[in-house]
Image (cartoon, rainbow, N blue to C red):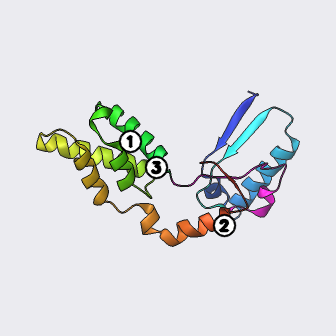
Amino acid sequence: MSPCVLWLDKIEKGLSSGDGGTSQRILATLLTWMAENTHQVFIVATANDISKLPPELMRKSRLDEIFFVDLPDSASRKDIFARRLSRRKQSVDKFDLDILAGASEGFTGSEIEQAVVSAFYRAYAEGTPMTTNSVKETIEQSHPISVVVAEKVQALRDWAKGRTVLAN
């Protein structure tokens, strides 16, 4: 099937230990395949907890680059709001994206999406239009992952400094 991209989502889940040796066999098979494969296959792997990845997978020529994707910045949050509002058939120009982006600092893209979905359902149930304020209220009622596990997020950011390529 080459040339192709092999996407390994949450790779650490399949390679974590403590499962009777299955993950070690998977790792050994993957490393052997990576070493012996002669076809054009570009491997992309995602990990939520890179500390669970074995060091032998992390070396150059196996995974050539490690990118760190941080939480979305203000411009990215505005773009996420615009896309999610449009998906809900809302006229984006009726919303103040600067206010929403400011209120959602520290939110992930999926948390922003859920704020829009919650505001949409609430407006529908109340028979009122969605507004900047109604979306902002749902944001203010949320506790983003960056707050709930702030120490882990900061530790990951600290680890990534100097070791990864920033992808934001």
For numbered disc 2, what is the local secondary structure?
helix
Question: Residue 102 at what x, y percent from top left?
Answer: 38, 53
Q: Which mark is residue 159?
A: 2
Would residue 117 be visible to someone looking at this image?
A: yes
Q: Nearer the viewer, residue 3 or 132?
A: 132
**Crowd around label 3: few <14 · some 14–19 · many ≥20 (10 Å):** some
Give the Cα distance between marks 1 and 2.
Answer: 29 Å
In 3D space, how far apart are the residues under numbered discs 3 and 2 (Cα atoms)?
A: 23 Å
Quadrant in which residue 41 is drawn: top right
Q: Which one is nearer the viewer's eye here, 142 or 75?
A: 75
**Residue highlighted by disc 3:** 74
Q: Position of residue 95 (x, y in %)?
A: 29, 39
User: Circle 1: is it few (<14), some (14-19), or many (20+) Cα within 10 Å?
Assistant: many
How many other residues sit within 10 Å of disc 2, few (<14), some (14-19) or many (≥20)?
A: some
101 on left or right of 35: left
Q: Find residue 81 and name its label.
A: 1
Q: Nearer the viewer, mark 3 or mark 2?
A: 3
> Chief secondary structure of the magenta span?
loop
In the rendered view, tell whether residue 155 sits above or below residue 114.
below
Residue extending furthest left? 127
Query: Which residues make up the magenta segment?
Result: 52-71
Residue 10 rendering spot, x and y as whole percentages: 60, 52
The label nearer to you, 3 versus 1, is 3
Disc 1 marks a residue whose amino acid type is: Phe
Q: Would residue 105 be counted in the magenta stretch?
A: no
**How many circles with numbers are drawn on the protein?**
3
